[in-house]
Image (cartoon, helix red, strand yellow):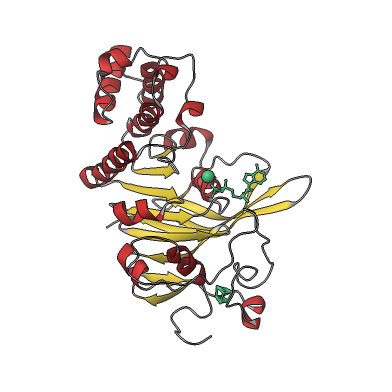
Amino acid sequence: MELFFEIKDVHVQFDTSKEIVKALNGFSLNVYRGDLIGIVGESGSGKSVAVSSVINLLRPPGRIVSGDVLYKGKSVYNMSKVELERFRGGVISVIPAGARSMLHPMLAVGRQIANVYQAHNPQVSAKEAMEKVVEILELVQIPDPHRRIKALPGEFSGGMAQRVLIAMALVNTPELVIADDATTGLDVTVQAQVLDLIQDRVKKLGSAAILFTHDLGIVAQYCRKVGIMFAGRIIEYCDSVDGLLRAAAHPYTRTLLSGTPGVPIPYEPEVNAAATSRQAISEKGCLAQERCLRCQPVCRAETPDFKEIMPGHFAQCHFAGRDGAI
Ligand SMILES: Nc1ncnc2c1ncn2[C@@H]1O[C@H](COP(=O)(O)OP(=O)(O)O)[C@@H](O)[C@H]1O
Ligand code: SF4
Ligand SMILES: [Mg+2]
């Protein structure tokens, strides 16, 4: 499969008047066509900042300090304004959380989707655009789309409004769809419909999707590959979800799994629960050192490598893959 997105060691910080918040600390991920990758992270771990950084839409005081995002070898950070407009919504699109606040309250739903479509297809007529909108609303299972296109977002339930956002994200047939906690707050049936749809599109179109979520259950059910995010980077990654569940190697991942029902191996907590969502990031050593119960002097002195402990399975801990070494 073709490697078409490379997110390389992205560091992001927020320079606020009070403090410098290091939100991404070496976020890296390779995306191949056909991939459905789940990135699991607790609140404040940097999921939304990672999403904004990938599409080069980080707002001040957020700042990309270093790193790069490559699409077919071309840097997203060196794209011109015109190239970026074509890229966002055309090549890559994001399904955000909180549907209602993302939609214009006074503009008919159909018009809002048509605007996104026409921005990328300026040659189509208004009538053709509306036909496309009806087609995409049918795809996301909005009943009676011919009538619904004229409705305002306020007339839609939360689940339907979220499906409208998904329609907007899919209308230009992007090569990569990124969902940023996009199913939070939806009831389980709607959530399953939405995730089935994303999964189906990846299979049919040979595109790719990344689901950023706090919900490991979703990832276990829908994704093939999985990354665990902690303090602004992926600290464990496995190209099979089952492989990760059976042989989690990072103390943070093992802690996460210790509280998750249905995991095949009994794990114990090895990392303290976060005191706040924002954790102190040490200049040197392991990102987890302040919370890890297994922390040793070497963890404070040296940053562990993100090493391949088994084929396709990586972890960033000095002791990963060395059972009984601590
Ligand atoms: N505008 C901002 N100013 C300062 N810090 C921010 C801002 N936006 C995000 N952050 C910080 O960046 C970190 C990651 O946030 P975010 O990506 O929203 O987390 P998640 O989406 O995983 O819940 C958090 O520590 C958060 O406080
Ligand atoms: S390197 Fe040390 S502090 Fe970091 S996760 Fe491993 S044991 Fe814990
Ligand atoms: Mg978020």
Residue 219 vertical position relative to residue 88 in the rendered view, above or below: below
Instruction: Count the labels in the image.
Output: 0
Asked if one can make out residue 57 in the rendered structure from this viewpoint, the answer is yes
Which image quadrant for residue 99? top left
Q: Is residue 206 left or right of residue 16?
A: left
**Residue furthest to the right:** 17
Give the x, y percent position of residue 134.
Answer: 27, 20
Which image quadrant for residue 25? bottom right
Residue, x 56% and y 47% (percent of image)? 49
Residue 31 vertical position relative to residue 106 in the rendered view, above or below: below
**Which image quarter holds the N terminus?**
bottom left
Q: In this view, does 133 lie to the left or right of 257?
A: left
Residue, x 55% and y 39% (percent of image)? 57
Residue 123 vertical position relative to residue 185 in the rendered view, above or below: above
**Residue furthest to the left:** 204
Residue, x 37% and y 30% (percent of image)? 159
Give the x, y percent position of residue 266.
Answer: 39, 72
Give the x, y percent position of residue 93.
Answer: 41, 38
Q: Is residue 222 left or right of residue 183?
A: left
Which image quadrant for residue 2? bottom left
**Residue furthest to the bottom:** 325
Residue 174 vertical position relative to residue 243 in the rendered view, above or below: above
Give the x, y percent position of residue 156.
Answer: 39, 21
Asked if one can make out residue 5 in the rendered structure from this viewpoint, the answer is no
Q: In which quarter of the image is ligand 2?
A: bottom right
